[in-house]
Amino acid sequence: MNLRKICFVVGWAALSLAMTAGAGNPPANPKTGAEKAMTTNYLSLPFKTIDGHNATLADFKGKTMLIVNVASKCGFTPQYEALEKLYEKYQKQGLVVIGFPANNFGGQEPGTNEEIKTFCTTKYHVTFPMMAKVSVKGDDIHPLFGWLTEKSPLPGEIKWNFSKFLLDKSGQLVARYPSAVEPLDKQLTDKIEAALKK
């Protein structure tokens, strides 16, 4: 074997070894919430309740879920009242409303989890499950909302507070509605009733 062939073989072996060694290395940059959601079952993505307990959507499996990003100082904040009425109306049939406070829009959810809980329970008598504050857009987006807005069957960035995501009993996202759609709007309640019957 001449010198040129020897150099080629040695060089190719070194390149192959380098590629193999690097294949299992993690990426240099940390994953965003959306990227984490890509590689994880979204029903098992962890979050905290407003009282600090661990939770996942899997805890509500078998129920029809309405996920809402909420805020205490928004023009849509009075929707809390209608969300509670919706929950009371359909709870026994298997609906759960899940509120996720977020401060992404106009700084309209500045309070602590404790302050948010007090506000919701005293002003609007909320009894549906409330979760700890999360981010629903941007670089620090929570992985669950990364999945809802980027990897779900109905992708699209959340535009404002009180966006609504409806998941059926199997956990599939079947509909989403913008802030202006009231919780007791017929287009939403019809979809909830259809999901509850499945």
Image (spheres, rainbow, N blue to C red):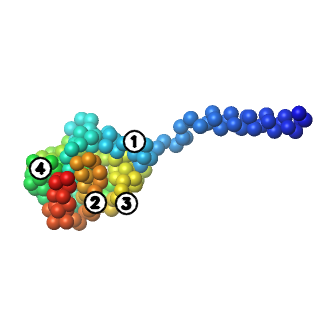
Mark 1 crowd level (few <14, some 14–19, many ≥20, 10 Å Cα): few
Q: Which residue is mark 3?
A: 156
What is the spatial separation of the Cα atoms under label 3 and label 2, in whole angstroms? 10 Å
Q: Which residue is mark 1?
A: 40
Mark 2 crowd level (few <14, some 14–19, many ≥20, 10 Å Cα): many
Is residue 149 visible to us here?
Answer: no
Q: Earlier in the sequence, mark 1 or mark 3?
A: 1
Amino acid type, callout 1: Thr
Amino acid type, callout 2: Arg
Is residue 73 visible to us here?
Answer: yes
Q: Earlier in the sequence, mark 3 or mark 2?
A: 3
What is the spatial separation of the Cα atoms under label 4 and label 2, in whole angstroms? 20 Å
Q: Which residue is mark 2?
A: 176
Q: Quadrant of residue 81?
A: bottom left
Q: What residue do we see at 26% from left, 38% from top?
A: 55
Provide the secondary structure element on which disc 4 rests.
Answer: helix
What is the spatial separation of the Cα atoms under label 1 and label 2, in whole angstroms? 22 Å
| Nearer to us in this view, 103 or 128 | 128
Q: What residue do we see at 33% from left, 62% from top?
A: 159
Provide the secondary structure element on which disc 2 rests.
Answer: strand
Mark 3 crowd level (few <14, some 14–19, many ≥20, 10 Å Cα): few
* Contact (Cβ within 8 Å) of mark 4 with mark 2: no
Residue 63 is left or right of residue 144, and the answer is: left
Q: Which residue is mark 4?
A: 93
Q: Is residue 154 above or below residue 92?
A: below
